[in-house]
Image (cartoon, helix red, strand yellow):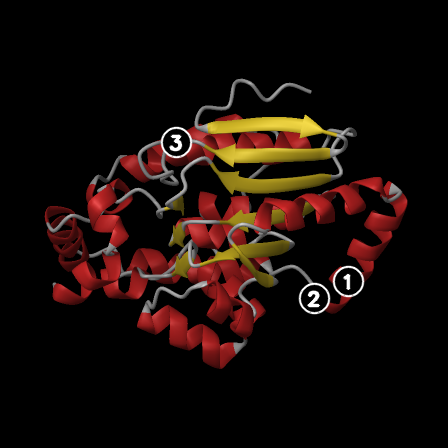
Amino acid sequence: MSYDDLAGLRVSVDNGVATATLDHPPLNLMDGVLLPSLRGFVNRVRHDIDVRVVVFDSADPEFFSAHGDMAYLTDPEALPAATAAAIAAAPDVPVPDGMNILEALSDEVRGLPQVTIGKIAGFARGAGNEFLMSLDMRFAAIGRSGQAQPEAVMDILPGGGGTVHMTRLLGRERALELLLGGELIGAELAERYGLVNRALPADEIDAFVGRLTRRIARLRPEVVAAIKATVETITPKVPHQAYAVENTALFSLFTEDMIASAHKQLAAGVQTREGERDLERILDSL
């Protein structure tokens, strides 16, 4: 199966392992380019019998994915355009009623028959971290990774599955801490809180993930399917109604004050490489 037409995404397949590398400069934004490519890939790879494991990583050593495009907040046409492109990327897969396209992608990723793994060696905030939370496993590089949901400080909420997945992974109390505090946390705290499976030394993460994926890829597909199905009975998928509640809450916050705040954030350097390196300080200063 070919994946060469997916803009901002490089895909290679080797011995049952597909590596999907986000390569959408300057920040790997979840925008009208990368979002359709990811959705197209997810709904194509589910039918690829040559792929048993999918690893998502980034070509950018500083950013896995900065967040969603700020244009979603400032340009009324940006999110509908990105949504239309993402729907066109998988036209045979309906978006459930009440869910936005980021939530739909999250739900589709969680439902893949393959084992999905995120390798984090850079910043993953907002929609970038929401995408990671929908995967089966996540591994983070000590001293190089950072994860956050800064949306509350930006006058909105994590509306791409962030509220429901963070609560599912961390529990109510820790989810509220990170969702309301907007703190950027490193690999070791992410491991302690349950946001990632393991925090690994930066010079060991590639080898570790490589060994793990090769072992899983050698398993009989029936074994993987049986284990995933059994685990899902204990940790079931997020109900569509929960996504719908999140989506309704998100759009209730799309006010004139929020739009004015988003413009101030952009003027202060948000969504530039320099600004994104120090995003939390910038947001706290506004």
Q: Is residue 77 above or below residue 6?
A: below
Circle 1 — which element? helix
**Amino acid type, mark 2:** Thr
Q: Of the numbered discs in the image, which one, if any, rests on residue 231?
A: 1
Task: Name the residue nearer the viewer: 23 or 35.
Answer: 23
Residue 93's place in the image compared with 240, above or below, is: above
Circles 3 and 2, Cβ within 8 Å, touching? The answer is: no
**Residue type, numbered disc 1:** Val
Q: Residues within 10 Å of mark 3 (few under 14, many from 20)?
A: many
First along the sequence among labels 1 and 3: 3
Q: Which residue is mark 2?
A: 235
What is the number of the mark on residue 41? Answer: none
Q: Amino acid at mark 3?
A: His
| Neighbours of disc 1 within 10 Å: few (<14), some (14-19), many (20+) | few
Pointers 2 and 1 in contact (C-beta within 8 Å): yes
The residue that mark 3 highlights is: 24
Name the residue located 76 percent from the left edge and 42 percent from the top edge. Answer: 214
> Is residue 279 toward the left or the right of residue 221 in the image?
left
